[in-house]
Image: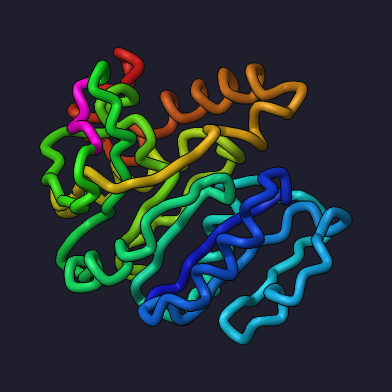
Amino acid sequence: MFTVVVPTMWKFEPFVQFLEDMTSVIPVGEILVINNNKDQTPNHPILNHPKINQIIPANNIFVNPAWNLGVREAKNDRVCIINDDLIFDLKVFHRMWPHISPERGVYGISAGNVEMGQEPITTGEINVRHCTTLYHNVTHFGFGQFMMFNKNNYTPIIDGLDIYWGDNFIYDTMYLKMNQNYQITNMFHYTPYASTVSQLPDHSERYQREHMIYNQQMPKIFNDTRVANSYRTGF
């Protein structure tokens, strides 16, 4: 079964209905909702569904620490991290079930942006493409909205990265361990993109600060010239 991990601030109105839709998916055994805005929790019966487990921190712990918490608490080896403002074709859980194994790294969604060199979304067939480079913010645009991996391959995201660069970290740690990362292409989905983060008054400052932390720490963590060269150029 899959454990779905989804931090939320309850800013995207269709999220609750999509939670209800996910509970009907047979391969989804558990949905961990990291409730980062408990005062705005909706009064909806779906939150009492046996597949849904709310984890309610005392304060907003932000996205990347919430991912770490959710993966740590996941009961299943197959983990799917999603944004709370993403609506996607639920058959992906059936399609990707055999792919999520200890021998493979992370699978993430491709936004289908042709101008960024991505495969267009046409038939919604849901395809898989092997990634042969470190994370690149252009060709991997959208990747962190939806990620699947085996829990045993996860490395907790480093301190100092609260909102940004967590998807880069997950991708690159798995890429350097096994070179078996993949993009999920041609999958129907909808998102307004960063509907929560864009409302933070200091999001630009946070982005720059966390970018600096990431650039400084990643080459030290991996001691790998590929990483050092990549992050000098800002990829």
Residue at image x 45%, y 41%?
A: 190
Judge whether residue 228 can be spotted in this image.
Answer: no
Q: Looking at this view, name the residue that lies furthest to the front.
A: 123
Q: The magenta stretch spans which residues?
A: 117-121
**Horizontal arrangement in the rendering, residue 70 relative to residue 35 (left or right):** left
Residue 119 coordinates in the image, percent (x, y)? 18, 32
Look at the picture and state if 146 lies above or below 149.
above
Check if residue 119 falls in the magenta segment. Answer: yes
| Residue 212 visible (yes or no) | yes
Q: Magenta part mainly helix, strand or loop?
A: loop
Residue 124's x, y, as percent?
A: 24, 48
Seen at 15% across and 66% down, the residue is 103
Q: Quadrant of the C terminus?
A: top left
Residue 221, quarter of picture:
top left
Query: Which is more toward the observer, 114 or 230?
Result: 114
Q: Residue 145 placed where, x, y %?
A: 44, 44
